[in-house]
Image (cartoon, rainbow, N blue to C red):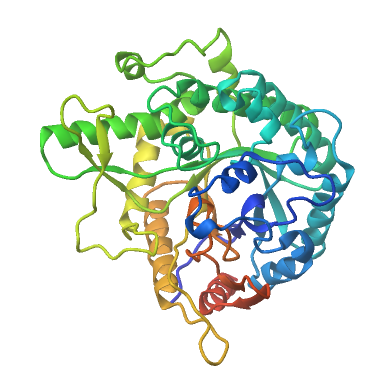
Amino acid sequence: MPLRFPKDFLWGVATSAYQIEGALHEHGRGPSIWDNFCRQGGRIARGDTAETACDHYHRYREDVALIAGLGVGAYRFSIGWSRIQPDGTGVPNRQGLAFYSRLVDELLARGITPMLTLYHWDLPQALQDAGGWLNRDTAERFAEFAQLMARLLGDRVPHWITHNETFEHTVLGHALGTHAPGLTLGLDCFAVVHHLLLSHGQAVQALRANLPAQAQVGIAQSMAPARPATDSAEDRSAAALLHLLHERQHNEPLLLGRYPDELAALGLDLSAIRPGDLATIAQPLDFFGINYYNPNHVQATPPGSPVPLREAEAPAHYERTEMGWPIIPQGLTELLLDLRQRYGEKLPPLVITENGTAVPDALDAGGCVDDPRRIDYLDQHLLALRTAMDGGVDVRGYFVWSLLDNFEWAEGYRPRFGLVHVDYATQRRTPKRSYHWYRDLIAAQG
């Protein structure tokens, strides 16, 4: 028997602009930080770039037809900021606006509800040259961008997400330098955190002022239980520190209107905070997006190390994805129940805005892709989600990452997360067996 979810539960799939669109130099699009990052030798596996990616910019009608074939109710996609404002500010690029307007109209014509993410890590390079997210002015520019998009698409897009994963963008892009823009600030990147969150609050204000009253506004944040590698006091302290820096630092300002007191004890430079900022950040939200893949295992580093914790291997008995991530569905149940207990009435309704896995898919001799490991992954995580909902957690929807195999950031094209296989040489799309499984699961919900 298939899992049962509420009749009004929102089923969907997700993508992001930079990972699928291609057409980086067409129709007035400006450069983004990822364009620049990809040109730096050794940054991206095998020297891959997103120059063509999935060519979604030209093939969006074909991709929308694939979404419609799933029977999902919604499609989560992002806007390429530099396609709209090549320099991150000023007069919008009409051709970029027209593309997203056509995409939204195509979705609506197929009965698919658009869920729009304003920022999925692809800052216009001109804004990075002016300081990027270290510069408070970037938050103002983002609010202007949000206002612009609301005025263009607000009559047709009912669900809006400001940011995707402020923690990952901060850590990978600004602390460790493994993602664009490639900064290595370590723990000295609180200003990035604060300006991202401030820009969220300012964008919510701009959206509320320009969208219909019934529009839904939220944010999509990564979530992962922090587990100590061992039961030692040092490793347990390292796990608590990761929980502080990941979940609490990025979400307590949104939901509680304050940063954790423990941040000051770490010696972080909190001078980016100005009077009134926390009230701006803590705008009421209609939903809270959760991106879940796996718990993070962590261990303490030796005394005197520049960073007090490091990633640890999960226990060997866990199966792993092609990304090397442990497959732990019960971590999703644990996470959702903990959020409900921690934030109580302050927690808005939840939407699982990303969940999925990379497995080494390949076309067989008959031109099919059989991916039972992905089907099992999705099935087990939906069971974990249903368990949390039965425990009282208010979850309104679930989005698979991803519709298509795509450009997986610094990993390039090797990992394949899609329900649809993409032959990057020919751009041929082939729905995998997991695509048909997901379609049937949704249909069985009635």
Residue 321 in the image, given as x and y percentages of width and height: 37, 64
Residue 52 in the image, given as x and y percentages of width and height: 68, 60
Residue 370 in the image, given as x and y percentages of width and height: 48, 82
Outermost residue on the top side: it is 275
Residue found at x 79% / y 50%: 100
Residue 247 lies, with reference to residue 22, above or below; the image says above
Residue 295 lies, with reference to residue 139, above or below; the image says below
Residue 386 in the image, given as x and y percentages of width and height: 42, 59
State which quadrant residue 188 falls in: top left
Q: Quadrant of the C terminus?
A: bottom right
Residue found at x 62% / y 39%: 33
Using residue 256 as the reference point, say whether residue 197 is left or right of it: right
- In the rendered picture of this protein, how many numbered marks are placed on residues? 0
Residue 374 lies, with reference to residue 147, above or below; the image says below
Residue 432 lies, with reference to residue 196, above or below; the image says below
Residue found at x 67% / y 51%: 17
Q: Quadrant of the N terminus?
A: bottom left
**The one of 57 and 65 positioned closer to us in this rendering:** 57
Outermost residue on the left side: it is 232
State which quadrant residue 19 falls in: bottom right
Outermost residue on the right side: it is 94
Outermost residue on the front side: it is 41
Using residue 298 as the reference point, say whether residue 212 is left or right of it: right
Using residue 259 as the reference point, say whether residue 110 is left or right of it: right
State which quadrant residue 275 falls in: top right
